[in-house]
Image (tube, rainbow, N blue to C red):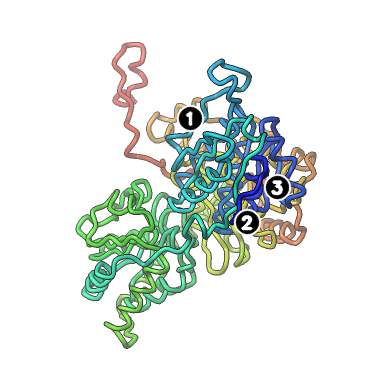
Amino acid sequence: MVKVKMTPSEAIVETLLAEGVDHVTGIVGSAFMDMLDLFPTAGIKFIPVRHEQTAAHMEDAYTRVTGRCGVCVGQNGPGITNMVTSVAAANMAHTPLVVISPSAGTPTIGWDGFQECDQVSVFKAITKATVRVPHPQRAADCLRTAFRIAYAERGAVLYDIPRDYFYGECEDRILQPHQYRVDKRGYGDPGSLDNAVEILVGAKCPVIISGRGVVDSGAVTVVTKIAEKLTAPVATSYLHNDAFPADHDLWVGPIGYMGSKAAMYSLAEADVILAIGTRLSVFGTLPQYDINYFPEEAKIIQIDINPRHIARTHPIEVGIIGDAKAASVEILKRLEAKIPDKVVDQERLAKIKARRKNWEDEILREAMVDGNPMNPRRALLEIAKVLPKNAIVATDIGNVASIANSYLKFTGDGMHIAALTFGNTGFAYPAALGAQLGKPDAPVFAIVGDGAWGMSLHEVSTAVEHNLPVIACVFRNMAWAAEKKNQVDFYNCRFYGVDIPNPVSFIPVAKAMGAEGIRIENPNDIWCAIEDAIISRKPTVLEFVVDGSQLAPPFRKDALKLPVRLLEKYKSLDYRNW
C-alpha cells in the first residue's frame, strides 16, 4: 500500500472513518477546528453537548449498546479537563473510549499560556493509556494505537495531539482495523477449561454469576444452557441486571447494594461459583442486608477477558483468560459430553423458585407501603412493570436510583446502563442520550434523583436539538437522600448539607427547553404517563414527587462510624450522649 500526502487532520479523519466512526461528541473549540471542518464532507456527524462531561458519558453508553468504541473531543485545557469524571467512569466500567485531546501548541508549551494544561498527566491515572502524538507524521499511527489499546484493554485512552500538529503535510497510508488490531479473543487454556468442568460436574451447589462480559459478548443464551445443564441458580453481577433473563426459572436476581436476597442466599450456600465475564468487584460483593453472602470456602472459576482481573479480589480455583462467550461455549461442550442427558434437580429448582418468590413478595410489600405523597419504591415498581422488553434503562447513583437495583428486570433485548463502581452523580441522563444515539428505535429511560438531575438537566436541550426521545424519570425527594440516610443512621438525624429545598417543579424548565413534561404524585398515573411518553417519541421529563423519608440503607455501613467527640464544645454530638 503506497503512502500518500495528506494533512494530519485528514489522516485523523480518514482513520476515524476506517474505524467506522460516524459521529464524535463534544463542544466546539478552536484547537481542533481544522479537523472539525472535514467532518461534514467525510460524513462524520458532530454531536454538540452543553458540558463536556456529558460527551464521555454519552459515548460510554453508546459503546455499551453498540459494541463500537465511542469518540469524544473538547477544547484543550478546560474543555478536556471537564471530561475527567466521565472518562474515569468509562474507564472503570471497562468501556472502550477514545478521547481526542488537543493540547497547547508546541511553540508555547511551558509558558502557562491561554488554556494550557498538561492533560497527559491529568489523565494518566484514569485511562488505560495516554498516547501523545510526537510529530505530525505520526497523527494516524498514534490514533490507531489509541483504538488498539481501547479495544484490547477495554477502557478509555487519551489521544493527545498538540493543536499545531493538525496542520501541515504528512505521508501515510490509511490502514483498516484488521491490519493493526485483533477483535477476536480465544476461549482460554483447554486444560483450565477441562479442570473447570470437572469441578462443576462434582459440585453439589454450583451457582453462576453472570456479568458485563456476558452482555458484551452476546453470551446470555450459552450461559442459560450451562445453568440448565447444572440446575444452577444464576445471579447477575452488581448493576448488570440484563446479564440473565429475569423470566427464567433459574434467575435469582442481582447481587450488590439493594440486590436480591434470593441471589445472596443462593451464593451463601454455593460450593462452586462460576463467575463469567465479571471482575467480582469488592463493592459488588460486600455484605448486604446484614447477609455476608459471598462464601469464603467456595471454589471460584473465573472467566475474564482481562488477566488483570483474574483473582484480583477473591482467591480462585481456576482462572480462564478469554472471551466470555467463547469460553462458555467450550464449557457447555464439555458439560454436554459429561452429562449427555438433561437431568433437572427438581428439589433444587423448587428451592430456587421459593427463594425468588419470597424476595419478590418482600419488595412488593415494601413498595405498597403508603408514602407522602408517593413511596419511591412504588414508583419504581410501576415503572418496572410498564417497561417494554427492548427498553434500555440508565440508572444514576443515589438513594432512589440505587433502589432500582431491586426492581429492574430484563427479559428481552433491553439493557441496563449503570454508573457502576465509579459512582458519580449526573451519569444517567447523559448516558441515556448516548444509548439512544446507539439504538435510535429503542425506548430509553433514565432513572435519576433530583440531586443528580441538577447536574444534567441542561442536557434536555441537547436531547431536543438532536431529537433523542429519552424519557427522564426524575425522583423529586428534595434531598441528597443517600447522604441523608447516613445522617439518620450515624449522626442522630442532624441534617446538614443534604436538603434540596427548592420546591419549584422541573417540568416548566423541561418545557422551556422544548421537551415534554409531566409531574406525577399518584402511582396510578404512572402507566399512562410512561406509555404516552413512549408513543410520543419526544424528549420527556417525568417528575415523580416521592416521600423523602422512605430511604434505603446506607451504601457503606463499613465505611462510617458512630461519632466520637473529644473536645468539650462538641460533647453533645458524641453518640454516647444521645
**Which is more N-terminal, label 3 or label 1?**
1
**Which is more N-terminal, label 2 or label 3?**
2
Q: Are marks 1 and 2 in contact (CB under 8 Å)?
A: no
Q: To which quarter of the image does residue 342 belong?
A: bottom left
| Residue 226 visible in rendering | yes
Q: Which residue type does callout 2 highlight?
A: Gly
Picture coordinates of residue 132 (x, y %)? Answer: 51, 35
Q: To which quarter of the image does residue 138 belong?
A: top right
Q: CA distance from mark 1 to mark 3?
A: 35 Å
Q: Residues within 10 Å of mark 3 (few under 14, many from 20)?
A: many
Q: CA distance from mark 3 to mark 2?
A: 33 Å
290 vs 57, nearest the viewer: 57
Instruction: Say if 98 sits above or below 259 in the image.
Output: above
Q: Which residue is mark 3?
A: 541
State the residue at coordinates (46%, 66%): 244
471 vs 553, nearest the viewer: 471
Picture coordinates of residue 494 (x, y %)? Answer: 45, 26
Q: Which residue type does callout 1 highlight?
A: Val
Instruction: Say if 366 sits above or below 477 in the image.
Output: below
Residue extending farthest front: 2
Judge depth for marks 1 and 2 and give the one in front. Answer: 2
